[in-house]
Image (cartoon, coloured by chain):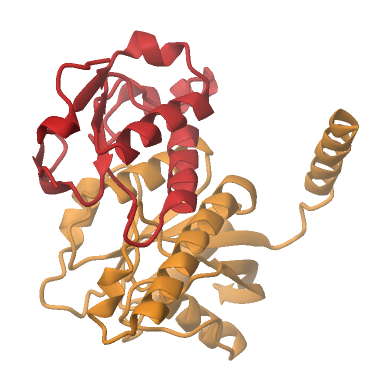
């Protein structure tokens, strides 16, 4: 995880989390790592994304942590999963939870604004405050 | 004790499934806030039972609790299909009470609404994981469908192998684009409609009977 910059220095800290690091974590550990980072104002970029079940739990846990004037939730972006070969029937039959091999960007909802998104491009604006 | 309770619950769930083949399927109406989910749920319920399900509003997060209308019997081509309709709160990854202040709401009311909205979203996700047999995914066809919430929810629905129909709602609006939704989710059938105006409801009911009957 990158520790090169800090939010204290009036910048935006970005944590790039490798797929290898994520592999060793349980679902709740992944969600906790993401939300702890976001609470601290970091942008968390996952080399390998979350499974659909983990995404579902991330939404639930995020909702439970929203607090007026303190935390309004997360902005999360990944490419649409529909074109991934892993999301098909055979993939599911083989027990694969559809695709985790997709870059995922997560940050505080009040600091990331998605400017454009389609099947191949995500353009986002990150603000300092 | 915990293990025994968990085992007992698992057996109960499995037994329930075994003997529930003839029970009406629970069809969850999902989508982002303000897509017209409750308007659609009310339209279906009124058409086939005469009752509404819940209040509609242009203010986001009007529906903050999942509501179920049981035994909605839809007749198509001489056959009838009985389903339970579950109208769910709009799913999002963020809720800011300040959004509601723009609708002339007092701060206390806006904060309460946002708290209830967050509980509602969590409840909707729980229903999706545990308690629905099929999904009608409602999108506002005048809005961009390439949002993360849509991408994630469709992915979650697909991962659970639930039958899903995509409804491109609000086709009565000038900015409506059905093609944009078809392009966003080409792997699923898209049905255009206006739940508010009652446009194309015959096809809506044909597809519900075909997918969930």
Residue lying furthest top in this view?
A20
Q: Residue at x 30, y 78 (%)?
A: B194
Residue B82 appears in the figure = yes
Residue lying furthest front in this view?
A8
In the rendered image, what is the letter of the chain coloured orange? B
Rendered hue of chain A is red
Question: Residue B41, how many percent across, how many down?
Answer: 48, 76
Q: Image height check: is A60 above or below B210?
A: above
Q: Residue at x 14, y 42 (%)?
A: A118
Q: Nearer the viewer, residue B179 or B38?
A: B38
Residue lying furthest bottom in this view?
B50
Q: Which residue is drawn at 44% across and 26% down?
A: A30
Examine the image and state in which quarter residue A78 appears: top left
Image side of residue A50 versus residue B169, left or right:
right
Question: Residue B165, how many percent across, how many down?
Answer: 42, 56
Q: Which of B169 and A129 is in front in this view?
A: A129
């Amino acid at each position: 995880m990158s520790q090169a910059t800090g939010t204290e220095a009036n910048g935006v800290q970005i944590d790039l989390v490798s797929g290898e690091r994520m592999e060793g974590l349980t679902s709740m550990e992944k969600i906790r790592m993401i939300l702890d980072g976001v609470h601290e104002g970091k942008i968390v970029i996952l080399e390998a994304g979350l499974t659909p079940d983990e995404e579902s739990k991330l939404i639930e846990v995020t909702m439970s942590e929203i607090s007026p004037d303190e935390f309004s939730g997360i902005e999360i972006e990944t490419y649409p999963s529909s074109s991934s070969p892993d999301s098909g029937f055979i993939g599911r039959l083989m027990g694969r939870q559809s695709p985790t091999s997709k870059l995922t960007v997560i940050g505080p909802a009040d600091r990331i604004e998605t400017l454009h998104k389609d099947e191949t491009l995500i353009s986002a604006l990150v603000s300092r405050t | 004790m915990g293990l025994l309770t968990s085992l007992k619950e698992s057996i109960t769930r499995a037994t329930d499934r075994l003997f529930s083949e003839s029970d009406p399927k629970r069809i969850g109406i999902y989508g982002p806030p303000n897509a017209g989910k409750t308007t659609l749920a009310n339209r279906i319920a009124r058409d086939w039972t005469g009752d509404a399900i819940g209040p509609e509003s242009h203010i986001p997060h009007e529906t903050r609790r999942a509501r179920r209308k049981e035994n909605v019997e839809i007749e198509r081509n001489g056959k009838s299909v009985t389903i339970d309709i579950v109208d769910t709160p709009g799913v999002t990854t963020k809720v800011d009470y300040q959004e509601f202040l723009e609708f002339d709401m007092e701060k206390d009311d806006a904060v309460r609404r946002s708290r209830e909205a967050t509980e509602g979203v969590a409840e909707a996700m729980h229903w999706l994981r545990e308690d629905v047999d099929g999904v009608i995914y409602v999108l506002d066809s005048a809005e961009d469908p390439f949002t993360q919430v849509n991408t994630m929810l469709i992915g979650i629905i697909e991962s659970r192998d639930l039958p899903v129909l995509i409804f491109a709602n609000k086709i009565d609006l000038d900015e409506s684009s059905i093609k944009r939704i078809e392009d966003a989710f080409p792997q699923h059938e898209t049905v255009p409609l206006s739940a508010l105006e009652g446009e194309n409801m015959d096809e809506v009911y044909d597809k519900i009977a075909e997918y969930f009957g």
